[in-house]
Image (spheres, rainbow, N blue to C red):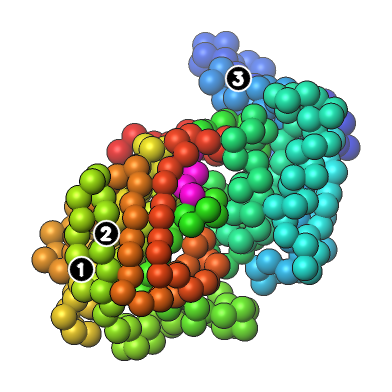
């Protein structure tokens, strides 16, 4: 059996250890486990993990991989070969590479048509897998949302914020193992100015920070690019006037930052007014920062970072925090708006939520 595992003839190892009084066969099973570990084979050692493993294999017969070769800082050929090695024993894998000038959402839409023609409207056992950064994942998610086709994610970007927010591992092997286990989680998708949004939108500080963290800077510094650009933006940020309409009430503010989050990891500091953004509660986290000067701005950032660490509400006097299923913002003049990493100009912002519109293959969330 160990030889068959090493030769790639076995798809998974399910082994329930015997009670101590009947463990005479452990000498026989230990080589199997070692062989499975050497061959990166999924292993289940209890009934719960075995059920998840078998359900993952059953659900994930056909995998359609949208692979962005320019994401991240690794060698795309080596990374794609690793992904194929992990997944192809259990997926009938089709690979579509992203191309310059072609929106990954369009590729996903073509795949949805192909899947529906093959499996019917429910998607059957098919899954669309996005491998790249948050831009690639967001584009594919925008096409899939509202369908019965699950989204798998193999994160290979700079921040991988959506993956981190859902607890999806960022290493290739662990991310592939998550796909094999096949646990499905339904999460919200927001709509910001008619654009699907899985993470967050930001005016002021967030938009300026993302705008300054260009591709060249990210290639050089990786995730540190956002810290570097954020430090520059603290100095450059100017306040702006806005009117927010939330739950039928109007709020007029002089703000340096307005962040509207659907999902966000702890590292998305400007979204952490409540200490944790819940991606499946049908609500937006709305954080308005109105510091008086640079020192106050640093205090706001420190308070939000501490809220993220402690998973507790921020009590900074320069912050106003709301949760609502929609928000409308009118600005006195046009400002840069970032929507899931895409920068544009806007004077009017409208955000709503489609509750649990997206199925994602993700670990079962831990109860806080």
Q: Residue at x 49, y 44 (%)?
A: 189
The nearer-to-camera label among 3 and 2 is 2
Can residue 267 be seen in this snapshot? Answer: no
Instruction: State which region is magenta.
Output: 187-191
Residue 333 is situated, as x and y percent measured from the top left of the image, at 36, 77
Farthest residue to the top: give it: 22
Q: Are marks 3 and 1 in contact (CB under 8 Å)?
A: no
Q: Residues within 10 Å of mark 1 (few under 14, many from 20)?
A: some
Q: Are marks 3 and 2 in contact (CB under 8 Å)?
A: no
State how far apart marks 1 and 2 are (Cα): 8 Å
State how far apart marks 3 and 2 are (Cα): 48 Å
Residue 34 is situated, as x and y percent measured from the top left of the image, at 70, 37
Q: Residue at x 64, y 29 (%)?
A: 148
Seen from the viewer's position, the closer of residues 94 and 332 is 332
Q: Residues within 10 Å of mark 2 (few under 14, many from 20)?
A: many
Residue 309 is situated, as x and y percent measured from the top left of the image, at 28, 57
Q: Are marks 1 and 2 in contact (CB under 8 Å)?
A: yes
Depicted 344 relative to depicted 306: above or below? below
Q: Which residue is mark 2?
A: 244
The verdict on residue 189 being magenta is yes
Seen from the viewer's position, the closer of residues 123 and 158 is 123
Q: Which residue is mark 3?
A: 51
Q: Which residue is mark 1?
A: 253
Can residue 185 be seen in this snapshot? Answer: yes
Q: Residue at x 59, y 54 (%)?
A: 138
């Amino acid at each position: 059996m160990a030889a068959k595992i090493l030769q790639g003839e076995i798809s998974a190892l399910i082994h329930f250890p015997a009670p101590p009084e009947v463990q005479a066969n452990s000498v026989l099973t230990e080589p199997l486990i070692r062989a499975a570990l050497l061959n990166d084979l999924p292993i289940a050692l209890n009934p719960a993990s075995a059920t998840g493993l078998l359900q993952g294999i059953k659900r994930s017969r056909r995998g359609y991989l949208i692979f962005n070769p320019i994401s991240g800082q690794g060698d795309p050929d080596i990374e794609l070969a690793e992904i194929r090695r992990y997944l192809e024993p259990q997926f009938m894998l089709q690979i579509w590479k992203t191309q310059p000038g072609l929106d990954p959402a369009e590729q996903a839409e073509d795949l949805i048509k192909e899947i529906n023609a093959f499996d019917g409207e429910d998607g059957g056992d098919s899954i669309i897998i996005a491998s790249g950064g948050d831009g690639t994942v967001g584009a594919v998610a925008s096409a899939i949302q509202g369908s019965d086709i699950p989204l798998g994610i193999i994160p290979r970007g700079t921040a991988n914020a959506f993956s981190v927010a859902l607890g999806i591992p960022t290493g290739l092997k662990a991310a592939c193992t998550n796909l094999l286990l096949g646990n499905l989680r339904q999460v919200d998708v927001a709509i910001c100015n008619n654009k699907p949004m899985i993470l967050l939108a930001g005016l002021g500080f967030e938009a300026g920070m993302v705008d300054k963290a260009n591709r060249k800077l990210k290639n050089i510094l990786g995730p540190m690019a956002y810290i570097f650009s954020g430090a520059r933006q603290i100095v450059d940020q100017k306040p702006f006037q806005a009117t927010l309409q939330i739950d039928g009430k109007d709020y007029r503010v002089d703000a340096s930052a307005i962040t509207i989050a659907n999902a966000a990891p702890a590292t998305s500091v400007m979204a952490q007014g409540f200490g944790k953004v819940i991606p499946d509660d049908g609500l937006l986290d709305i954080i308005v920062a109105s510091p008086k000067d640079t020192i106050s701005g640093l205090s706001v950032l420190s308070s939000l970072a501490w809220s993220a660490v402690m998973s507790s509400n921020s009590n900074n006097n320069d912050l106003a925090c709301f949760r609502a299923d929609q928000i409308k913002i009118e600005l006195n003049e046009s400002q840069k708006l970032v929507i899931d990493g895409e920068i544009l100009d806007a004077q009017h912002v409208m955000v709503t939520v489609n509750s649990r519109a997206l199925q994602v293959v993700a670990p079962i969330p831990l109860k806080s």
